[in-house]
Amino acid sequence: MTPAVTVERLSKRYRIGVREQAPDTLFGAAKRWMRAPFENYARLRDLGRFDDSVEQDNVLWALRDISFDLARGEVLGIIGRNGAGKSTLLKVLSRIVEPSHGRAIMRGRVASLLEVGTGFHPELTGRDNVYLNGTILGMTKAEVDGKFDEIVAFSGVEKFIDTPVKWYSSGMYVRLAFSVAAHLEPDILVIDEVLAVGDYEFQEKCLGAMRNVARAGRTVLFVSHNMAAVKALCTRGIYLAQGRLAHEGDTSSTIDAYLSTGAKIGTDGSIPESAHQTSTGEARYTHALIVDAARAPTHEVHYRDPIHLELRLVVEREIRRPLLDARVTSEGLEITHAMLGERDAAPVALRPGVYEIVAQLENPMQPGSYSITVGLHYSDGRTIDYVEHALELRVLPVARQPELSWTHPWTAGLVRVDAQWDVVRA
């Protein structure tokens, strides 16, 4: 079967510091018109000399040699860190940006939702913009008429449908824009991280709508930093890193590849400079370890055993009323966190110096793989230092007390909740 999307050796480069200047006079416009054939020839010549093995200081490669196919009805999750090239890829697929090399073939009508209010005219009302978007997507007025009430009801902006959209909040913008894109039956639906603008209820509606689009045999490309949403919705995934395709496969393996790419902690617990660490410079974690009861480094704990952390913090400037926290996540979803300073007694201030920190976390997690992120914050929530996915943790199915070991062949959920059951014959 012919795929809905074919991407072959797609690359996009930008020249840093080069900006097209629009002509501000009639003479300037005429001069640009006369130069155009020569400039176009130079661009074609550059494409003919394409060589991605040559690094240039003034060239930024947003995408480099990306190839994949996407079948009809598949939902592809595209994940990666900020600046990885995710949005650039969607813009190329949506024909907003021309590739520097390679090609992308989209077989069918494409609806794109890349930024809040994309394709909306701010001076027009919500009603007018629904028809405008429908026309852009190739729909007739009669087709939009048949879907109009459903679109407005889904978006939840009925009260403001005849108000110019320049007065809409960002949430109202994205709700109406998504509703139009999802209900006008595109063959291919392209969605960037705009759903983060909506509230929880609307996000659930959007995920349901995208599932319905996929069940109808249409194709979805979905960029998100919400790993739980990606796993729930997508049938396949690709992971982009620095413009390259770092991993392609099923959703779970792609998420695992993404979350495990942080720089590895040294055997002595030292945090390398390449770790995903955000710091103001006032203080910085330099070491992090999971240890066992004998204080030996480990990445595994028995089922139901507490998690022991040892951290080293270097403080450069006095920090008043600090909050220290450790967050346990699975596939980007936060499972639990422990915080010092929220309820427990904490130092009134951390003065400049080196601090050794020992923490013990309860372990309600089911057997499986997890990540631990450590942070330091002010009492008002401002972050001082944050090491994302600093430690990898595996909870074993075997408990130290054999009767507590996990014996079922399947694991439901991420957290084990104790319960007391009474069964009484009526």
Image (tube, grey):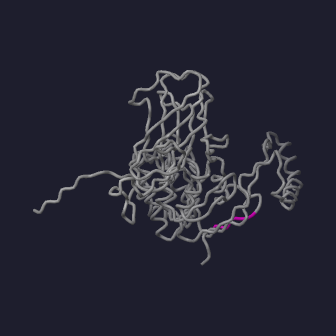
Q: Main secondary structure of the magenta part?
A: strand
Q: Nearer the viewer, residue 305 or 112?
A: 305
Drawn side of residue 123 relative to residue 14, left or right: left
Drawn side of residue 335 relative to residue 103, left or right: left
In the rendered image, residue 4, in percent from the top left (x then y), is placed at 60, 70
From which residue to which does the magenta span run? 102-106
Seen in the picture, residue 204 relative to 351 is either above or below; the reply is below
Indicate the quadrant containing the C terminus: top left, top right, bottom left or bottom right: bottom left
Seen in the picture, residue 190 relative to 392 is either above or below; the reply is below
Q: Nearer the viewer, residue 238 or 277?
A: 277
In the rendered image, residue 117, in percent from the top left (x then y), is placed at 55, 48
Q: Residue at 44% across / 26% down in the picture?
A: 346
Is 105 in the magenta?
A: yes
Toward which corner of the image does residue 96 lie, by quadrant? Answer: bottom right
Q: Residue at 52% across / 42% down in the picture?
A: 373
Q: Residue at 61% across / 45% down in the picture?
A: 265
Q: Residue furthest left?
A: 426
In the rendered image, residue 88, in percent from the top left (x then y), is placed at 66, 53
Q: Residue furthest front?
A: 294
Q: Is residue 175 visible?
A: no
Is 313 in the magenta?
A: no
Seen in the picture, residue 378 relative to 61 is either above or below; the reply is above
Q: Residue furthest bottom?
A: 1
Q: Is residue 150 visible?
A: yes
